[in-house]
Amino acid sequence: MTERDLIRDIRVELTARGYRTIKLWGGPYTEPGLPDVLAIKDGRAFFFEVKMPSGKLTRIQEYVMADLRRHGALAECVRSVADLPVRVRTQTGLSRGLRGEP
């Protein structure tokens, strides 16, 4: 499986759960470090940087994801569909913590 396949599988899963997904492309006019996938549901933004199991976040990716979190979005690195945060997979707990904790 490639990272491209994983991004597709994650988008399919999120779409099946009612999320609007957008693949964010890197390019000359795109802010460096933006995560790969934006998912929106119920007025909430969820950003996912997709990495293969051995992949590592760059420093700019870590910075951008922390900044997105400071602005109220969920921003996570995921390495599989099962790695999606609990509140995304179950469509519940939007007012709870990242992985379902209070």
Image (spheres, rainbow, N blue to C red):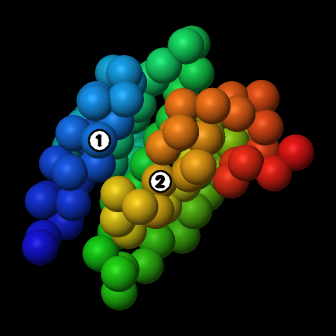
Is the residue 88 above or below the residue 44 in the image? below
Instruction: State the residue lying farthest toward the bottom.
Output: 54
Give the left or right position of residue 102, taking residue 27 as reference.
right
Give the left or right position of residue 65, taking residue 89 as reference.
right
Q: Which comes before the other along the chain, label 2 or label 1?
A: 1
Image quadrant assignment for residue 62: bottom right
Q: What label sits on residue 26 in the rendered view?
A: none
Q: Residue 81, position in %: x, y?
A: 35, 57
Is the residue 43 above or below the residue 32 in the image? above
Which element type, helix, strand or loop, lies under badge 1? helix
The amino acid sitting under disc 2 is Leu
Give the left or right position of residue 58, taking residue 95 as reference.
left
Please tell me which residue lies in front, 22 or 59.
Answer: 22
Is there a contact, CB below 8 Å, between mark 2 and mark 1? Answer: yes
The amino acid sitting under disc 1 is Glu
Give the residue drawn at x 35%, y 65%.
80
Question: Which quadrant of the figure contains the N terminus?
Answer: bottom left
Q: Residue 54, position in %: x, y?
A: 35, 86
Q: What label sits on residue 13 in the rendered view?
A: 1
Asked if one can make out residue 33 in the rendered structure from this viewpoint, the answer is no
Which element type, helix, strand or loop, lies under badge 2? loop
Give the residue drawn at x 88%, y 45%.
102
Give the residue drawn at x 21%, y 60%.
6
Q: Residue 71, position in %: x, y?
A: 71, 31
Q: Which residue is mark 2?
A: 84
Mark 2 is surrounded, within 10 Å at the Cα level, by few (under 14), some (14 to 19) or many (20 or more) other residues, namely some
Q: Residue 36, position in %: x, y?
A: 32, 48
Label 2 and label 1: CA atoms lie apart by 10 Å
Please tell me which residue lies in front, 91 or 8.
Answer: 91
Mark 1 is surrounded, within 10 Å at the Cα level, by few (under 14), some (14 to 19) or many (20 or more) other residues, namely some
Asked if one can make out residue 93 in the rendered structure from this viewpoint, the answer is yes
Please tell me which residue lies in front, 38 or 13.
Answer: 13
